[in-house]
């Protein structure tokens, strides 16, 4: 199993960014996928989950209405569209595989991509 | 929203047993997962579904969950176990992490 995030970088407050996660080594379309973030020096924070088919999505209250999770099972890819970014969204963003098609544990993680929101 | 409470730090001598707790309202009715994170690395699941060890995790790692407290137990602690540990559950379709516990091996 390999998960590789990309798309992070420096963005101004109020700006947008789209993160991607390329998956390999497993049947991507069979598992729910998550985004989890970690602000510098802080703990882990769950961001969002999408079901295996993409038909169900859930978000943390802190990002609801601003972030959109999506997936393309034909490309084995997971995405996170982040709009109206705030300084408090600065974090390393990890994609994480769920070993089922519903919320359980996160059995594999990518290495993360850093998002910095600053003027 | 559901809150998980962990001690900020736990210290233990090599060869001894470390216990890291995770408190939550009726947490015993939920499945608890535990992650180890070393500096600069992504987290790794060390216990899932309260007490199951994923493949490759040493038998020294074990978990329990009852009432309002879940516990991660690390037996015969080694220097390489020094890391941050996080508990995690699902509540109302939202993932919830504890604040994390820094395990220091003396």
Image: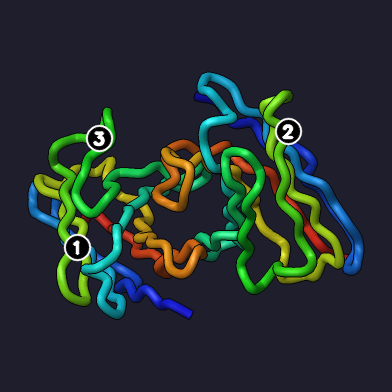
Q: Position of residue A88 (x, y in %)?
A: 72, 71
Secondary structure at numbered mark 1: strand
Q: Is residue A43 visible?
A: no
Residue ID at (38%, 62%): B89
Who is closer to the viewer here, B23 or B10?
A: B23
Q: Are marks 3 and 1 in contact (CB under 8 Å)?
A: no
Chain name for mark 1 = B
Residue ID at (52%, 36%): A31
Residue denoted by label 3: B57
Crowding around mark 1 (Cα neighbors within 10 Å: few <14, some 14 to 19, many 20+) is many
> Which mark, residue A72?
2
Residue denoted by label 1: B71
Quadrant in which the C terminus of chain B appears: bottom left
Residue ID at (32%, 72%): B6
Q: Position of residue B25 (x, y in %)?
A: 29, 80
Secondary structure at numbered mark 2: strand
Q: Quadrant of residue B2?
A: bottom left
Q: In the image, which is nearer the foreground, mark 2 or mark 3?
A: 2
Q: Is residue B26 left or right of residue B18?
A: right
Q: Position of residue A9 (x, y in %)?
A: 81, 48
- How far apart in space, not on screen, are marks 3 and 1 (Cα)? 17 Å
Chain name for mark 3 = B
Secondary structure at numbered mark 3: loop
Is disc 1 on the same chain as disc 3? Answer: yes
Q: Are marks 2 and 3 in contact (CB under 8 Å)?
A: no
Q: Position of residue B99 (x, y in %)?
A: 42, 69
Who is closer to the viewer here, B50 or A54?
A: A54
Q: In the image, which is nearer the foreground, mark 1 or mark 2?
A: 2
């Amino acid at each position: 199993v390999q998960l590789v995030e990309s798309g992070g970088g420096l963005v101004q407050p109020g700006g947008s960014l789209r993160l991607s996660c390329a998956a390999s080594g497993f049947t991507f379309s069979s598992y729910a996928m998550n985004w989890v973030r970690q602000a510098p020096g802080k703990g882990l924070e769950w961001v969002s989950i999408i079901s295996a088919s993409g038909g169900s999505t859930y978000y943390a209250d802190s990002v609801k209405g601003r972030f959109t999770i999506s997936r393309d099972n034909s490309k084995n890819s997971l995405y996170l569209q982040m709009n109206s970014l705030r300084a408090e969204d600065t974090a390393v963003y990890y994609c994480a595989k769920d070993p089922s098609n519903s919320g359980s544990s996160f059995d594999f993680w990518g290495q993360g991509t850093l998002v910095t929101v600053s003027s | 929203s559901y809150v998980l409470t962990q001690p900020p730090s736990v210290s233990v001598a090599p060869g001894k047993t470390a216990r890291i707790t995770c408190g939550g309202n009726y947490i015993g009715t939920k499945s608890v997962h535990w992650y180890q994170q070393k500096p600069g690395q992504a987290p790794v699941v060390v216990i899932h579904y309260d007490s199951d060890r994923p493949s490759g995790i040493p038998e020294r790692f074990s978990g329990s969950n009852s009432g309002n407290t879940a516990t991660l137990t690390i037996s015969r602690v080694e220097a390489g176990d020094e890391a941050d540990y996080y508990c995690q559950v699902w509540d109302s379709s939202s993932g919830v992490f504890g604040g994390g516990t820094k395990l220091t091996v003396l």
